[in-house]
Image: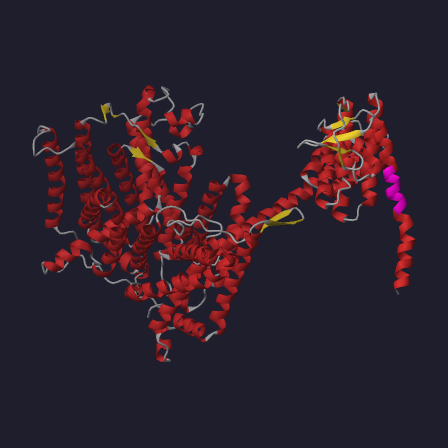
Amino acid sequence: MLRILLLCLLMLAPICAPSSARADDAANEAVVALAGQNFDDIRRGVEALGVSGSPRAAAILGALQDGRLVLGADKQLFIKLPEGGYQAALTGEPAADPGSVRPVRVNNSIRRSVDAALGALRLFDASAATRASAAEAVFKSRDPAGIPALTRAIAAEKDSGVKRTMEQARAAALFAAGDASEADRLAAVATLRDRGDIDARALLSTLTNQPPSVVEAAAAAVKSIDFSLQLWSLLQSVYYGLSLGSVLLLAATGLAITFGVMGVINMAHGEMVMIGAYVTFVVQTIIRNHAPGLFGASLFFAVPLAFLVAGAIGVAIERSLIRWLYGRPLETLLATWGLSLLLQQAIRSIFGPTNQEVGTPAWMSGAMQLGGLSLTYNRLTIIVFAVLVLATLMAVLRYTSLGLRMRAVTQNRRMAAAMGIRTPWIDALTFGLGSGVAGMAGVALSQIDNVSPNLGQGYIIDSFMVVVFGGVGNLWGTAVGALTLGILNKFLEPVAGAVLAKIVVLVALILFIQRKPRGMFPLKGRAVEA
Amino acid sequence: MIPLRSTILTLVLVLGGAILMAVLNLGTAESSALHVPTYAVSLAGKYLSFAMLALALDLVWGFAGILSLGHAAFFALGGYAMGMYLMRQIGPRGVYGNAVLPDFMVFLNYKELPWYWHGFDQFPFAMLMAVLVPALIALVFGWLAFRSRVTGVYLSIITQALTYALLLAFFRNDMGFGGNNGMTDFKDLLGMPLQADTTRVGLLLATAVMLCLMFLAARFVVGSRFGKVLVAVRDTESRTRFLGYRPESYKLVVFVASAVMAGIGGALYVPQVGIINPGEFSPANSIEAVIWVAVGGRGTLTGAILGAILVNLGKTYFTGALPELWLYALGALFIFVTLFLPKGVIGALDRFRHIRPVDEVPPEKISEVTG
């Protein structure tokens, strides 16, 4: 076994060795040329060094670019180190002070060659990111001088993504190369069309001095890029809309329970959301001070805690205030509005009127690219969270005994009481559940909105709109309503601007309620008359 | 329906109070102990303007059962009409010295006056607009809402959406109403300088007279056959409909009338406070107006005036002396009144005097939800 391995190594050795030896030879020759007298020699030396594949090429060329490549007495090249001292150009070993030196002379044409050679060298860098950015630089400059280096780099490239970038860069540079054939140009147009972004479109739409067939192909490619760009921006709008919709959904879900199921107008609902956000703030502060390592998990602590705190406050509100006002919806509205003022002012007294800093865990920051879409992780998390909350809530209402009792009390209070259900308790728990869900929404909103005592105010009208639009007493309706309003808003924004879009949506909603006073998915049957 | 005694008492108190303040402001020396400072005169004028809004709200809420959470929008629209007139009166005395364009338009690079600003240099036209614009919006909105039988809480929520939409709209600079800064720096009204004591006193008297006229008109309306149908609509809308009335028409008429009253209140409010900005549209303002009515006593008209003055006196005191406590006080007031004073101060007074209230507010329908 070992012998076979050794044999393999022996067979490989001759393949590797000569290539590095060749690189050294080429570098030697290039350095000799660099030490030459006239500018032509030096320029040839630069170009030769660039393609030599020598590991020292980048260092030598970089020194030349900075004017630190110097010529010793016996035509030896040294690199003058910025911190003082010298090193031999070819070996990189420290060298003794060579005495009198003069810098290698450069002119503009050599400077250009150095830049091009350095750019080309970066195409062979060990890091894929550097190679990709070097290719991107050629794409931007469209300099045909980069084509040979790119061709070699493409042949050597293993990473398919970087390879594609290099091919696009070569295609971009190709149009300015005089000797490119028509077929090559057409292929380049196709490559750029596949790239399909705004840069490729800019390049294709500004082509000059091209054969007619190429111009035609470029025009077609521009059209196709325009189409796909529009498609992506449409999808991006849908994503923004979903994101806004999920925020609305989170804020409105709790309301769908208290208003939709219980028929209680809770104007302090927004304050439950706000309290959830402050719970997040408190949790994060404690974690920062006592267990900084857990910061990434802070939201996982905050969500259940916010549910419990807001839910407990909700139960307290129901027991102390709401239960005296059942059957008087307008009075409930006024009393809970007063309550919302009290809660806001209480938070203001405790935490101060300014915005509180709520951090975003590392796993929620950043974005992911999906084709032409950019999906930010925090928004994505909120969408997923909203769906989870809604699903959990539906499951609770549908499958648990508490949910069964809630539905029973909602549908026929007296009959439910006759069956032994303690309706006052169910009222309190239902209200607590709705408030708790609002608290969880607050945790999510703390990630995208300012955490201030006014946080809830901004959502209360929108939330009511969502519930009324979707149909009172119907969680599915709330979900559809929230997403519809979110997407509608985001589609109108580019046309009308953010504020006007909001106004249009509000007016459309007011008109919609005239047409369908009970929302998109009204409850049917006797409960409607309630 | 409103007792004659309380009517006369209200008129005497409002007019008498205003005249007394006028005399004490103009007729006494500044050093005198009896002197009423001019800011107090304007403050009283402000309260009386708010009382108009409260009166308008009581008319729709107390007698037609329409709880509008957007009534301050009509108030603000009237105020903006007055504000536009006052802006045009500034003329070349503005910071930029432009004879036609108000300062904020010069600042925002307007080249000429937007078409809807034309005519506002004429006082009668501006006042017509202060009445017509709220009326028109109330007409369109009410026609749509009442015709499709949007009632109760739903109506409250969409009125709130209405004022919210207007709030957002008036915040926009492109609307040509001064954006979020609104309009201020007014110079004179009908040629009289706004800073002068006599103008201030005149405004207070005009507001008091206007409030009394409105009060009498409202009293006449609720006492008429029309008012009786309104109360019937409030208490059982469907039964009234089955009796052959058209509740939506009655509601629409009273809603528009109420919007007009609110608009006039706004028009008188602006010159006395010297500024109008989109904040007046904020839903919180409308809800605060509801609490004035609730505190005074819903469905009593006198209570609305009383509530507006009482709550605002409290607000002035609290925001001056204990600013951080004002929202606690207001919030507690909302809860206290709804839980313990369902008929407001007037109702409590009546009960205290063992007089059976003439205008008994029957309990609202107990809904199926609560059994």
Residue at image location 8% in from the left, 34% down from the top: B34
B186 and A263: which is toward the camera: B186
Question: In the figure, is residue A170 to the left or right of A3?
Answer: left
Above or below residue A134? Residue B160 is below
Question: In the figure, is residue B227 to the left or right of B182?
Answer: left
Residue at image location 54% in from the left, 50% down from the top: A241
The spot of residue A215 in percent (x, y) is 78, 32
Query: Is A20 a magenta residue?
Result: yes
Query: Is A456 a magenta residue?
Result: no
The spot of residue A523 in percent (x, y) is 45, 64
Above or below residue A197? Residue B111 is above
Instruction: Specify how the rendered protein is coloured.
Output: secondary structure
Taking the image as drawn, is residue B217 in sight? no
A522 and A273: which is toward the camera: A273
The spot of residue A221 in percent (x, y) is 75, 39
Residue at image location 51% in from the left, 58% down from the top: A293
Residue at image location 34% in from the left, 31% down from the top: B183
B293 and B288: which is toward the camera: B288
A48 and A1: which is toward the camera: A1
Figure quadrant of the N terminus of chain A: bottom right
Decide whether the magenta segment is chiefly helix, strand or loop.
helix
Question: In the figure, is residue A520 to the left or right of A101?
Answer: left
Magenta highlight range: A17-24
The answer to which quarter of the image holds residue A406 is bottom left
Taking the image as drawn, is residue B254 in sight? yes
Figure quadrant of the C terminus of chain A: bottom left
The spot of residue A170 in percent (x, y) is 79, 37
The answer to which quarter of the image holds residue B349 is bottom left
